[in-house]
Image: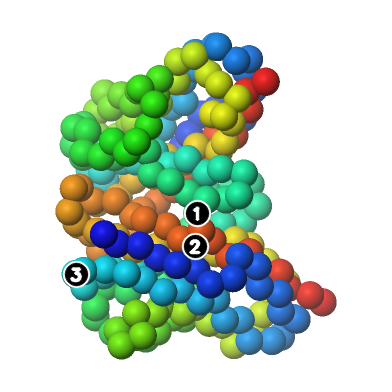
Amino acid sequence: DTAVSQTPKYLVTQMGNDKSIKCEQNLGHDTMYWYKQDSKKFLKIMFSYNNKELIINETVPNRFSPKSPDKAHLNLHINSLELGDSAVYFCASSHQDRNTEAFFGQGTRLTVV
Amino acid sequence: AQSVTQLGSHVSVSEGALVLLRCNYSSSVPPYLFWYVQYPNQGLQLLLKYTSAATLVKGINDFEAEFKKSETSFHLTKPSAHMSDAAEYFCAVSRATGGFKTIFGAGTRLFVKA
């Protein structure tokens, strides 16, 4: 009965490769997010989707491309991976109302070597 | 623009002692404020949230926070620390402009000594 699930949990890959992270939520939320957490634990939003439409695209290299096939899924594809992309990526979801909290997945630890 | 500042990247307390984690916010509109906890190798979990209903908010595991508009603060407290409280704590604010998203503070690592 996992609410927000991400796969894979760990991802080790070489520079220059392309990889995807998948996210699914079964909470019936209409908004989904990708956050990046760096080695100092700082959390920064990358993207936000509402009803499959991109709402927020923070200053993220265009090597990162989110895709939302439906309201319950938000995937993240990364092209030409760089060492600096190593981080933990969190998927989250919420209702659109600003007073509702976000529910987070367990995170995907990406290591680029 | 909205933002939150957490004072102190690390806080250390003894087991049984009071926990106080500080958070100040900046917002041009009435804010909605949250505290999240992150245990090692896990995602974030909501501890409590302020949505203007009451200034003193109670959360899970005996945590509570008080919204003080005059001080633009939303500090998190717990009367008696447990070893299991050791984790990273994040204060966050939500905004409405430009889409709905939550902006997080830099986090405070809580250490609990036996």
Across and down, in percent, residue B50 comes to 32, 74
Left of A62 or right of it: where is B79? right
The Cα atoms of the two marked residues, 2 and 3, are separated by 21 Å
Q: Amino acid at mark 2?
A: Phe
Q: Quadrant of residue B68?
A: bottom left
* Residues under numbered marks 3 and 1 in contact, where contact means CB atoms less than 8 Å apart: no
Q: Are marks 2 and 3 on the same chain?
A: yes
Q: Nearer the viewer, residue B80 or A45?
A: A45
* Residues under numbered marks 2 and 1 in contact, where contact means CB atoms less than 8 Å apart: yes
Which chain's residue wears label 2?
A: B
Left of B101 or right of it: where is B91? right
Q: Earlier in the sequence, mark 3 or mark 1?
A: 3
- Residue A4, visible in the rendered structure: no
Q: Residues within 10 Å of mark 3 (few under 14, many from 20)?
A: few
Q: Residue at x 59, y 88 (%)?
A: B79
The Cα atoms of the two marked residues, 2 and 1, are separated by 9 Å
Look at the picture and state if B73 lies above or below A95.
Answer: below
Q: Which mark is residue A66?
A: none
Residue under circle 3? B29
Across and down, in percent, residue B67 comes to 35, 82
Q: Residue at x 53, y 72 (%)?
A: B7
The C terminus of chain B: image quadrant: bottom right
Look at the picture and state if B63 lies above or below A90.
Answer: below
- Residue A111, visible in the rendered structure: yes
Q: Which mark is residue B90?
A: 2
Q: Earlier in the sequence, mark 2 or mark 1?
A: 1
Left of A43 or right of it: where is A27? left
Q: Amino acid at mark 3?
A: Val
Q: Residues within 10 Å of mark 1 (few under 14, many from 20)?
A: many
Residue under circle 1? B44
Across and down, in percent, residue A46 comes to 37, 38
